[in-house]
Amino acid sequence: MANSQAVVVGGGICGLVAALLLKRRFTNVVLIEQAETVGGLFCSVKDSSGAAYDMGSHIPNATGIEELDKILFSDADSGSWNKISRLRSGNFFGGSWDLNSPFPDATKLPKETYLSGCGELINCTELPDTDLIYDYCVDSLGVVFTESIVLPILEKLYGKDAPLKELTMAAGLFGFTRILALPADVTANLKQLPAFDAKLGYQRESDFQKRKAQDNLSEVTYYYPTKGEGIGYWVTQLQQQVEQAGVEIITSERVTQIVHHNNKVTNLMLANTERVLKCDFLFWSAPPFIALRAMGLTPSRGQVTLRTALIFHLNFDRPLLDRNSHYLWVWDPDSAIFRLTLYPNLIGRSTHHHISAEILCGPDEVSSFTEAEIIKQLKEMGIVDSEAKLVSGHTQVINNTFPVPTTEFQAVNQQNYETLTNCVDNVVVSGRFSGKCWRQAEVLIEAYESIMRVADAS
Ligand SMILES: Cc1cc2nc3c(=O)[nH]c(=O)nc-3n(C[C@H](O)[C@H](O)[C@H](O)COP(=O)(O)OP(=O)(O)OC[C@H]3O[C@@H](n4cnc5c(N)ncnc54)[C@H](O)[C@@H]3O)c2cc1C
């Protein structure tokens, strides 16, 4: 289309990549971001010693789509990235570490609980057919393991006041629908059956590799920047590409009105500059209810709770004791920490000994956690040397970041998504707020495929 203009709203990684792809198809592309900088959840901070930490998402992986991966990791061979073919993870459960698997090990439960749980688990032979985490786990793991392993984890992540038995798999974030429970050989054999594959984790890397070969699964490469800038480096690279392609990026700005006629968006009005943008195609990666309001429509409303992420970024004077794991889960209910990121292991080498400990909590609970208590826990867990001293650090509080995935949350999302996409034809609603995808690679693949569909149709 001659002199056509696409507008992208939301400058997270979804919006940045969409802007680049759209610039190959539209004459002009304008990207509107409400924050001062682009990048969304992929964002890093530095402490007073120059150690860089990440704020939200941080270990991106290639998507397997050539056009997309060339954009994402255009400098993949420049030495700027540590390419990781297998993410090394472990978990703290039942008072000890298992550094070979992210999944909680049921054998650490009291013997009677473990044995009765195994009896149930073996008898659940069908793949569950439900969207609710609790029901799914009951149908897959049985009541005993669900109550003794899964429910405490749900409570730790989403809070004791959340309707824990009514949470949906919508944001299938943490993978705790799998556990370890049976001997390695038995597990490897049972995992040939879909229902057991869905609930048991491999215990030996060799079994996992054998299975990958059997199923012809392609290798996934994860990337982490080596230059000491944290994952913020990725966003800088993408932003440069977007700017070089001629996309206009407007930050600290939002859309106040979306004009639409005959099922087509025609113009957008901006709040601060009061500019009116022509819009032949709208790529929306912000929450859909904001678009509905700007169109003069009433969005669906409901009780939606968002958790606060409290992140303790810590840099010590001694190397971390775990020199192998990239990240670790803490499933024990006794600790409020749910995830640790070990940067020296991600970078491959580092001048700093830095780690992030993440907590999800209610906004009013933030003050009940202290840096001193977190450091004490990390020492007790054997991640930080008991003699280590804190050199520098930074504590981040990110409010309203993690949705509690209630059925109501899912229904509100779905309804707003549908109202918006049914109302106008020249809009794509994508990104994590669309409710269609969550993890970074899924988000980008979904955005790519949406744009390809539009390109094919026009
Ligand atoms: C705390 C957290 C941790 C996560 N960790 C991981 C992980 O480790 N691995 C993984 O694969 N996935 C993770 N995810 C999933 C995450 O959804 C994706 O990785 C991905 O970052 C989503 O990109 P996005 O661009 O859709 O959203 P975002 O990164 O949230 O970007 C949306 C952008 O839109 C902007 N915006 C919002 N409203 C407006 C408006 N009205 N006008 C203009 N701009 C607006 C925001 O400021 C933001 O920049 C995590 C999610 C959360 C919440």
Image (tube, helix red, strand yellow):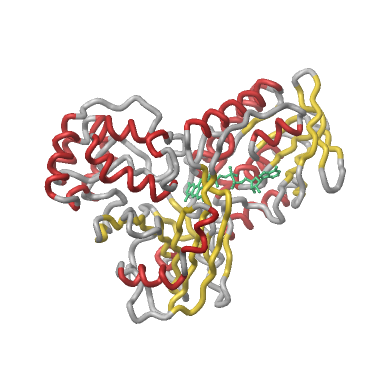
- Quarter assignment of residue 389: bottom left
Q: Is 93 on the left-hand or right-hand side of 5?
A: left
Quadrant position of residue 48: bottom right
Decide if residue 412 is in sight here.
Answer: yes
Relative to 55, 148 lies left or right: left
Please tell me which residue is depicted at 44% across the width and 46% down the height of the picture: 158
Looking at the figure, which quarter contains the N terminus? top right
Q: Position of residue 42 (x, y in %)?
A: 57, 53
Q: Which of the pair 204/81 is nearer the observer?
A: 204
Which image quarter holds the C terminus? top right
Residue farthest to the top, as pictured: 262
Residue 60's x, y, as percent? 49, 50
Examine the rendered structure and indicate whether residue 132 appears above or below residue 229: above
Residue 24: which quarter of the image? top right
Image location of residue 397, percent across then percent down: 56, 59
| Nearer to us in this view, 3 or 343 | 343
Q: Is residue 79 visible?
A: no
Q: 73 or 274: which is nearer to us?
A: 274
Q: Residue at x 77, y 27 (%)?
A: 265
Q: How many labels sit on residues?
A: 0
Q: In the rendered image of this protein, does residue 167 appear above or below residue 221?
A: above
Left or right of 109, for residue 420: right
* Residue located at (24% from left, 61% from top): 96
Give the percent coordinates (x, y) of residue 243: 73, 51
